[in-house]
Image: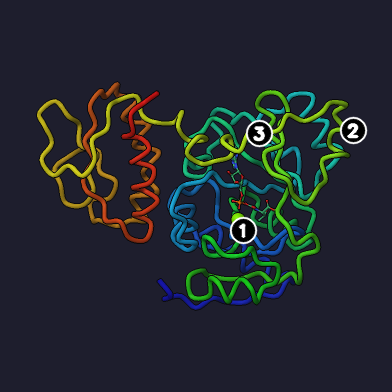
């Protein structure tokens, strides 16, 4: 998958407008934030978000952080209770991510939230990131801009070394000041520390006047996080010959109304996955058969998700 030329863009007006144009057409741009470089895509565009997973070769669909320029914009995508508002008003822009209830009709790709009803949002402080977000004028999904399992990048050179040839551009805003990912606080229930990071816990607890709950390691493990998003129906995998009472979730040239990608394109299949699982729920489908999906590239993440969906329910 190294077939693109990765442009290195300077963090001036021309570079930022170029980067925003790439995001608008569904491309991938790595950009500097104060924590680490993020690999950005339009968070409303399923195919663009699928390309993030493809470029990183992520073996599973972890939900991604949505980056916005300010609190007002964040409120389009998530609901804030008083405690969440207090944190946002006190700290943002900062290396602080809040996991909040997803607003109905947010327009965000289900691949960004991994189908959850919560969303992680951050207002970054870095000038380049802020200028890009304002110019693009939309929500940007961005995990760290490194291949899966490798160290997070803190310079444009790190990004090119890891992802050169797989992404459209890197917006070079220099070396990241914090150099460590954002602190993540879960705000969908009792405020909970989900990940230690760039903002220490003490000032957050002082701001809230309470001690944060500590997530057991199981809450942040993707399997646990995603388990409540299995479809309601029973799932059977690697099916070439569905039974008469099963609905086929297809891949490639098979006869079905619900096809992840009729042409057998894994990026398209990833982009459609959560949407079609929702359709199966909306249709009240009780028995789901899934076509075989090649276990290469993005196919690994798709199969990881489907294997969880097919696992016996507790
Ligand atoms: O500093 C950072 O946070 C960087 C820069 C680029 O902003 N981004 C980053 O993203 O570290 P990423 O994708 O590597 O980490 C996202 C983390 C994951 O551990 C994921 O599980 C958690 O955020 N997360 C995202 N949405 C969530 C949700 N709805 N509930 C719980 N955890 C969530
Ligand atoms: Mg990372």
Q: Element at badge 2? A: helix
Ligand 2 within 8 Å, label 1 CB? yes
In the picture of the structure, the residue carrying the numbered disc 2 is: 206
Counting residues from the N terminus, which is met first, the one under dot 2 or under dot 1?
A: 1
Left or right relative to 163: residue 288? left
Q: Residue at x 34, y 41 (%)?
A: 306
Counting residues from the N terminus, which is met first, the one under dot 3 or under dot 1?
A: 1
Q: Element at badge 1? A: loop
- Judging depth in this view, the residue of 197 and 289 nearest the camera is 197
Question: Number of numbered discs present?
Answer: 3
- Whether residue 131 is visible here, answered yes or no, is no
Q: Single out the mark in the foreground, 2 or 3.
A: 3
- Name the quadrant containing residue 276: top left
Left or right relative to 97: residue 273? left
Q: Quadrant of the C terminus?
A: top left
Residue 3, horizontal then vertical, whole percent:
41, 76
Q: CA distance from mark 2 to mark 1?
A: 29 Å
Q: Single out the mark in the foreground, 2 or 1.
A: 2
In the picture of the structure, the residue carrying the numbered disc 3 is: 215
Q: Element at badge 3? A: loop
In the picture of the structure, the residue carrying the numbered disc 1 is: 144
For the residues bearing labels 2 and 1, Cβ distance under 8 angstroms: no
Dot 2: few (<14), some (14–19), or many (≥20) neighbours within 10 Å?
few
- Name the quadrant containing residue 281: top left
Ligand 1 within 8 Å, label 3 CB? no
- Judging depth in this view, the residue of 108 and 177 nearest the camera is 177
Residue 122, horizontal then vertical, whole percent:
70, 45
Q: CA distance from mark 2 to mark 3?
A: 19 Å
Q: Residue at x 73, y 29 (%)?
A: 213
């Amino acid at each position: 998958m190294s077939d693109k030329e990765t442009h290195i863009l300077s963090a001036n007006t021309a570079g930022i407008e170029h980067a925003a144009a790439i995001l608008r057409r569904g491309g991938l741009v790595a950009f500097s934030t104060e924590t680490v470089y993020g690999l950005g895509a339009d968070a409303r565009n399923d195919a663009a978000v699928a390309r993030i997973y493809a470029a990183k070769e992520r073996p599973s669909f972890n939900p991604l952080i949505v980056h916005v320029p300010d609190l007002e914009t964040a409120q389009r995508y998530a609901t804030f209770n008083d405690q969440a508002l207090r944190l946002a008003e006190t700290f943002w822009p900062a290396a602080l991510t809040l996991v909040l209830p997803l607003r109905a009709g947010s327009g965000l790709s289900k691949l960004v939230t991994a189908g959850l009803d919560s969303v992680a949002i951050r207002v970054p402080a870095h000038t380049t990131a802020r200028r890009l977000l304002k110019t693009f004028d939309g929500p940007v999904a961005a995990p760290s801009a490194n291949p899966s399992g490798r160290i997070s990048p803190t310079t444009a050179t790190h990004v090119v070394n890891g992802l050169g040839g797989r992404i459209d551009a890197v917006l070079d805003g220099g070396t990241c000041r914090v150099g460590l990912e954002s602190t993540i606080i879960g705000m969908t229930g009792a405020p909970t520390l989900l990940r230690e990071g760039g903002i220490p816990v003490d000032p957050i607890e002082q701001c809230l006047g309470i001690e944060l709950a500590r997530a057991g390691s199981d809450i942040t493990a993707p399997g646990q996080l995603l388990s409540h998003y299995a479809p309601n129906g029973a799932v059977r995998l690697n099916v070439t010959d569905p039974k008469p009472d099963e609905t086929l979730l297809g891949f490639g040239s098979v006869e079905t109304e619900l096809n992840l990608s009729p042409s057998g394109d894994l990026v398209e299949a990833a982009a459609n996955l959560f949407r079609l699982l929702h359709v199966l729920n909306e249709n009240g489908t009780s028995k789901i058969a899934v076509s075989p999906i090649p276990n290469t590239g993005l196919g690994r993440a798709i199969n990881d998700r489907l294997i969880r969906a097919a696992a016996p329910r507790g």
